[in-house]
Amino acid sequence: MWSASWLTKYLYTAPMSLPSPFAVSGSGRFAQVDHVAQTGSTNDDLLAVAPTTPTHPRVLIADEQVAGRGRRDRTWTMPPGGGLLTSFFVPWIQADTAHMVPTCLGVAAVNAIAEHDRDVLLKWPNDLVDASDRKLGGMLSSAVVDDGRFIGVVAGLGCNVSWPTPDVVELANATCLDRLAERPINRADLATSLIRAFDDALSSLESAGPIPMHDQYRQRCRTIGQQVRVERGAGDLIGTATDIDPSGALLLDVDGVQHRVDVGDVVHLRPQ
């Protein structure tokens, strides 16, 4: 669920007020919401500015990213205005529980989308999928380190909302929210729901500890119980995903032998 990132030069220079009609309401610790029409990567932007105000939570939403990326630095592209592109900086000094911050974002994303009458699930390690395994979105998180000191997490989400060329999405075994809902989904309303749900999830983590939030993630994870192929640099594994452990690792049964997988890409296998 984690990726290390280097700080480079970004297009994002200063916050903008959210212009009408894209009006998003902040919530709790995320009272301030910044918006830009275009940037390189919302995650990279927050990684660059977070050390300047390390105790200040931030939310950044972009209409378009020109240098978006997914896991293993894969390119992440989306038509301008076609989805929700948002990143959060969460100040967090407890490094041993920081892996739960992206877990909270995954749970929050499922809960927020449910408010808009669609049920989606999580695919380990960082995808949103529908009941047919079509990809709806992805998440990427990075630790924020300033002068050798861990200060928090940047957690980003890209979610397909309304693509002007839905046939292209379907060819990639993906989908978008308005196709699932069979009606237009308002990006600003979805962003408001996500911000509130993420703040709620983090508050639950702070008050109740990691176990209840970990259980919520497991309940929403489509990967558990599936026959899967885990693609790794050290070689693929094929077996049954039996659980997600408290550290976020996938537990995989391969012919009766239990494997613990921290990093890898998962393909859900269907019976022939």
Image: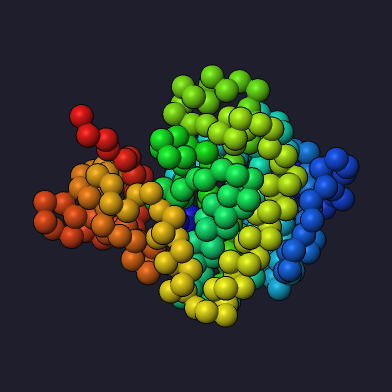
Q: Quadrant of the N terminus?
A: bottom left
Spot occupied by residue 12 in the image (x, y as percentages of width and height) = 75, 47
As drawn, is 211 to the left or to the right of 203? left
Residue 122 in the image, given as x and y percentages of width and height: 45, 50
Labels in figure, total: 0
Q: Is residue 100 left or right of residue 49?
A: left
- Name the residue located 62 percent from the left edge and 73 percent from the top edge: 203
Across and down, in percent, residue 197 comes to 63, 60
- Compared to residue 69, the image places residue 98 above or below, namely below
Instruction: Please indicate, yes or no, whether residue 152 appears anywhere in the rendered image.
Output: no
Q: Position of residue 22 (x, y in %)?
A: 81, 43
* Location of residue 141 (image quadrant): bottom right
Give the colouring mode of the picture.
Answer: rainbow
Give the residue drawn at x 60%, y 35%. Answer: 181
- Residue at 44%, 67% (x, y): give it: 214
In this picture, is 12 found above or below 93? above
Q: Is residue 243 visible?
A: yes
Relative depth, front residue between 140 and 145: 140
User: Quarter-wise, where is residue 66 in the image?
Assistant: top right
- Taking the image as shown, residue 15 lies to the left or right of residue 52, namely right
Query: For the C terminus, which image quadrant?
Result: top left
Q: Nearer the viewer, residue 79 or 225?
A: 225
